[in-house]
Amino acid sequence: MKKIGIMFVLLFFSFTMVGCEDFEQNNKAGKTDETDTLDDNETLIEPDVDITSDDITVNIWSDLGVTQVDIIDQAILDFQEEYPNITINLSNEYTKMYDRVKQASAANQLPTMAITSLQNIEGFNQINLTEHLNKYILDDYYGVDLENYLSNFMEEAKQVDGNTFLSFPFHKASDVMIVNKTLMEANQQTIKTDSPYTWDELNTVSSSVLGTEDGNCEYLVDYESPRNLFKALEQQMQIEYVDYDGNLMNNPGELQSVLDVVYTNLENKSLVFPIVRQQNNSAEAFLNQKTCMVVTTAYALKYLNPNNQFDVEVVSIPQYSDTDKAYDYTGKNITLFNTATEQEKFAAWVFTKYLTSEDVQVELAVKASALPVIKSAFNNQVFKDFLTNPTNNQLLSSQAMNVMITYIDELSYTKSFYNKSLTTHSSDSAYNFIEGSLEALAYFPKEDVLAGIIEEFDEE
C-alpha cells in the first residue's frame, strides 16, 4: 500500500506541472573542419530551386514568449523588404506543440517550420518529420559560417548522431539566481559574486538570515523549477538519470545522492519550491521578502524586479561543490518539416538564417535576456552598451547576461531522447516525473520517493 500511495503522489505532482570579452569572428561561409564528416550528398541546395520570383508562403508554429514573438514579427517585416515575394505567417501557442504537430501531420496540415524545444524536435524526428539541415548549412552561398556560432549550441543541434543537424539554434539562456541584497546586508551577509555558492555555503547563510522576525526570510532559495534543479545536480554530480533510450540509470544509489541533497536543504529551509508554498511561481514571495533568493531562468527576471523596494544582485546558480561546476541551459531551436516543398524549405531556411543574424540576436539579448547564438553579436556596440551601461529597465537583464557570459564555455545541455520507457514522446515526461518526485520530498521520506521512482521505471 505504501508503494501505491507514493506512486500516486509522484504522478500527481508530475502531472500538475504547468515552465564583454571580444570573440573572434571568421567571415568565411561554408564548410569548416568541424563538418568534415558531413555527407557529401547533403552539401548543396538543389540548383533549380528559386525563391526570388515565385510567391512562396512559409508558415511557422512557435511556443515562445510575448517578447520573442514581437521580435520575430519585426524580423518578418524586415526580411520581406528583401524578399517581398515570401509571405511568412507566425502562429504562436505556448503549450502542447508536439500534440499540435502530430495531429497536423495526420491531417496533412503541417506548417513549414517550427520554433520550439529540442525535446519537441526530437519527438518530431521520431515520427520522421524533421528535415536534415546539413545541405542548407553548408551551401556555398546560402550557408552559414559555423565558426561564428557558439559550438555548444551547435553540438546540441546535432546531438542525435553527432553529425546531422535536425535543427538550428535560435536563442538560449541559463538559470541564474537573484538575491535580495538589502536583506542580506542587513544580516551582515556579503553576497558572493566571485564564484558560485555551494549548497553547503548556503546552509551557513541560512543560519543568519532565516527567521520569523522582520528582516528575516522564511526560506533562503526558492528554486522555481525543480526540474532544472535536478538537471543542474545531475550534471554537477556527474550522474546520468536516463539514457538516450529512456532507461533509468543503472545505479539508483546515484539518484539517492541527489535526493539526499534536495531533502536536506528542504528540511532546513535553505531550499523551497513554489508548490510547497502553495504558489505557482516565485515572484510574490520574493517581492514580499519571504524568500531571500530565487533561481529562475534569465528570461523570467522581469517578473522579479522589486522596482526600488530593495536592492538585488544577480549571481550564478548554486553548485554541489567548488569543483565540477556545471550550468544547464534551455532555449528554442528552429526546425523545418520535410513535408514542405523544396521551395518552401529553402525559403524557410533563408529566414532561419536571418533569425540568427547579428541584429536579431542582439534584439533578443537586450529585450528578452537571451544569450546570442553567434559570436559576432558579442562585439556589437549595442550589446556592449547593454552589458556595461544598461538603462534602469535593463539592469536585471544586464546583470544576468554578464553572469551567463562568465561561464558561457561551460554551459551544458541535457540531451533529448525518445522516451520508450515512459508514456509520452520525449524527455519531458521523465523530467516531469522527477520534478514531481523532488516536490514530494517535502512531504514523504526520501526512501519512499526513491522507491516510487524505481517502481515507475520497473513497471514499463
Image (cartoon, helix red, strand yellow):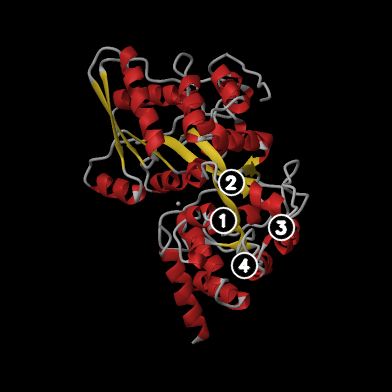
Q: Identify the residue at the far right of this view.
A: 323
Label 2, label 3: how many angstroms apart (C-alpha)? 21 Å
Precedes in sequence: disc 4 or disc 2: 4
Rendered image quadrant of residue 22: top right
Q: Tell me the kind of residue under disc 1.
A: Gln
Q: State which tag comes first along the sequence, 1 or 4.
A: 4
Residue 173 coordinates in the image, percent (x, y): 54, 39
Q: Where 26 sits versus 62, above or below?
A: above
Three-letter code for the amino acid on which mark 3 is drawn: Leu
Q: Which residue is mark 4?
A: 212
Q: CA distance from mark 1 to mark 2?
A: 9 Å
Mark 4: few, some, or many residues within 10 Å (few <14, many ≥20)? few
Q: How many residues crowd around disc 3 within 10 Å: few (fewer than 14), some, or many (20 or more)?
A: some
As helix, strand or loop, the secondary structure at mark 3 comes to helix
In the depicted structure, whether residue 294 falls above or below residue 172: below
The tag on residue 266 is: none
Residue 406, relative to residue 8: is it above or below?
Answer: above
Q: Residue at x 45, y 63 (%)?
A: 422
Label 1 – label 3 distance at C-alpha: 17 Å
Q: Quadrant of residue 346?
A: top left
Q: CA distance from mark 3 to mark 4?
A: 18 Å
Residue type highlighted by circle 4:
Thr
Which residue does the numbered mark 1 point to in the structure image? 289
Give coordinates of residue 4: x percent, y percent: 47, 81
Q: Pointer 3: what residue?
A: 202
Q: Which residue is mark 2?
A: 310
Secondary structure at numbered mark 4? loop
